[in-house]
Image: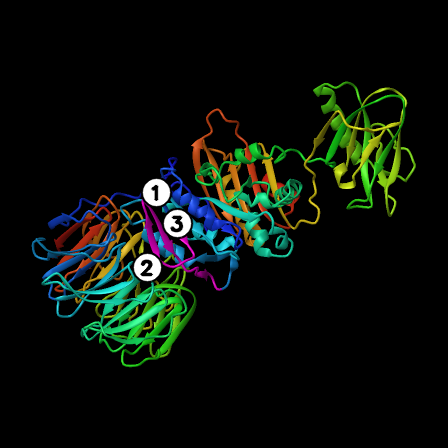
Amino acid sequence: MLNTVETRVPVTVLTGFLGAGKTTLLNRVLTENHGKRIAVIENEFGEIGIDNDLVIGAEEEIFEMNNGCICCTVRGDLIRILGHLMKRRDKFDYIMVETTGMADPGPVAQTFYVDDDMQEKLMLDAIVTVVDAKHIWEHIDDSDEAKEQVAFADVILLNKIDLVAPEDLDRLEARIKSMNKMAKICRTRDAVVEMDNILNVGGFNLDRALEIDPKFMEPEYPFEWSGIYELNTGTYEWVMGEGPDPAMGAALLPLANNGLAAKEATLMDAVLTFSEDEQAVNAGETLHLGKGQHNQLVLNGQGETVFNFVIQRPGHYMLFTEHHPDEFDAHLCGTDAVLAPLETREYKPDHEHDEEVTSVGITIPGDFHLERLNSWLGQLLRVHGLDIFRMKGVLSVRGWNERFVFQGVHMLFDGRPDRPWGNEKRQNKMIFIGRNLDRAALEEGFRACLVS
Amino acid sequence: MSGFMMRRKDKRKPPQPSLQAMWRTDIDDHPIGLAWSPDGKLLAAAGVSGPITLFSGRDGALQGNLPGHTLGTMAISWHKDSRLLASVGQDGKVRLWDTKTGRQTSEMAGGASWVERVAFSPAGDWLVSAAGRKLRLWDTSGELKYEYPDANSTITDIKWRHDGKQFAISAYNGVVLYDPTKAEPLNRFEWQGSTLTLEWSPDGKHIATGDQDSTVHFWLVATGQDLQMWGYETKVLELAWSSNSRYLATGGGTQAVIWDCSGKGPENTKPIMVEGHRHLIKHLKFQRRGRLLASGGNDGLLAIWKIEKKKPVMLADAVFKTPIAGLAWSPNDRYIAVSDESGILSIAAVQ
């Protein structure tokens, strides 16, 4: 059945550690005047009708489906309760499912793919994870559940921001983004959030991810930062403190003018420069200037290290650094003062240090061969399903006028046509979130499924 | 594991409907329980929102309304005397009703907020209820006889053996057998999966189960031996034994699969396939003594089949606008009651 009008009831799954603010958020959803009839399935017993809404208690019953395969683990209680709910005449516009604090979001998400009745009548709209901005640090490094809750999320509420300093919040947000680039992040206090941010999020909208994080799916660069400086003839000092690494790559390139075209050209020069062999530059030495000069700034073991910039022609210069200078407290000093760059830019790095949970976004042109894609994806998921937490994609399939959308959880995936491409440019966008993902292999695998 | 959904080609339309309704009514609710009184005089229909309506089996005349359960009725069961009706629901209660007066005679606590299953024993001496993992045995006055140890997970079905001397429950992990005169389970048939429904063969030799993992199991009750049938399209919630215990009809897809248990079967035999539904089959019922099988599906088709070894023959059919919600043969096998999800309830004579 070709169903372009979505008639399935959307479901939001709410995850988050105990005390993060899930219940506060649920109460907000139930009392907010959003005009929807919402059924809430929560962890406590009993059933309460609240005005139009309904709260049903459930005891999480996690079932393995095929003799112990974790990828086929589902919530049996949800199949029963939601199955019954969908028979009711007083239809609900929306369903929210709250999970217990330590829950792995996998089984609840998989439930919406494994069971035919569920798949026919319900649609997983979004996984919303509430994060206690203050206490998450206690879990994020060593709790698999905390990592999975972040990795599975479509929306992350950084809650209790009033208890955390703004710079810690930025640090947390950066950390979360390095694990899950797809999620929309909302900073909240007492879980106050616009309902539009958590209801009807629309799981398939990859454009949202592009909107929220302009770095998402951008080409990747071998450097994280660039700054433009206006420099006169003379010697400058590039001062670096101790940082996460004992050395850092850098390139200093002249910029013809401050126009966009010149910046883009210099950016390409920098990419080429970073592909050259590195030349070590030790403390007190001068950086090699210009295209092709890939400097490796070697830091002293302790304290500050000073490198020199020797400028012979006044003008604009663009400095590219492998890491963000802030990580090393790095700055450029003129004769009597610290020089601020005229403008800076941050780049999406092509590596994520030390983070086993990451996301890989792929954008490729062309049309897919559906059967080839189906069989390749099937095989990929059989082998790597455990490590792939979530995936989403909007694909262009040969012979189809409609966009083909797919999403999946672990080994399970569901693909179907949605609206026609119309004037939109036909292309393929996909994102995978999981553990130990191999970008090159994923991309190569996809390319092999294109119609040549 | 699911894959990409392809465009579904609709199969040939079934022939002109041939089953004529004797009477037809509308309960204006999604029917979840449809049960004939053992004397065939009354048909009870429970709606998902709670109320239970009693109709005359002969002409559909309204015979009574029972309030049922606030928040929703989950299941009903008739007592052998055709007067007492048990119901369970989302108010956590087991209720007994005198259908003659319309009055509630007993109200018992099921043990959890949703009481999902209830079954009177064939002789009418016992009533079993299941609420979550709680299993309770009652007498007909509502006195609690046993509260059994909690099941491994939510109990999905309860069925009495036809002689009433044992009953079995299903849950995640398989089947547990009980004797109503003993406080401890008699036996367990274990399967690492979520068992959704069970049926005793009328001769009591087999218990068939339908499972969430798209399998069907035949347990040999005497030995506990498990025969497994794999390859169903989806979870299996539809099971029906023929009265002579020879055939087991199973759903779990758009075709019904019938296993022949005569001779060495069903092991290593090729089942009989019943083709004609265009969507998932949701109900299968054999006549109580006769050989005919009724099937009802999400395509709204109700079909009556004669089982032939080569190819089943569709004897009669009727098409409803919405998926079939329930089927029940009258005790004398001459009528079939059917309801669809919109609440239409009708009875047709089957020759």
The disc numbered 1 marks a residue on which chain?
A
Q: Nearer the viewer, mark 2 or mark 1?
A: 1
Q: Can marks 3 and 2 be said to lie on one chain?
A: no
For residue A137, say whether it is visible.
yes
- Above or below for B177 versus A450: below
User: What x and y, as percent, mark residue B36?
Assistant: 15, 61
A356 above or below A290?
A: below
Residue situated in front as seen by the camera: B244 or B282: B282
- Please name the residue that numbered disc 1 is placed on: A37
Q: Check residue A40 in the rendering and tell me which mark sits there, or answer none.
A: 3
Instruction: Check whether the beta carbons of the residues at disc 2 and disc 1 lie within 8 A of each other.
Output: no
User: In the orientation shown, which residue stands out farthest toward the right?
Assistant: A284
- Residue at 73% across / 23% down in the picture? A263
- Rendered location of residue A37, percent (x, y): 34, 42
The residues bearing labels 3 and 2 have C-alpha atoms spaced at a distance of 26 Å
The answer to the question of whether label 3 and label 2 lie on touching residues, with beta carbons closer than 8 A, is no
Three-letter residue code for mark 3:
Val
Chain part drawn in magenta: A40-67
Q: CA distance from mark 2 to mark 1?
A: 30 Å
Q: Residue at label 2?
A: B237
- Secondary structure under the numbered disc 2 in the rendered image: loop
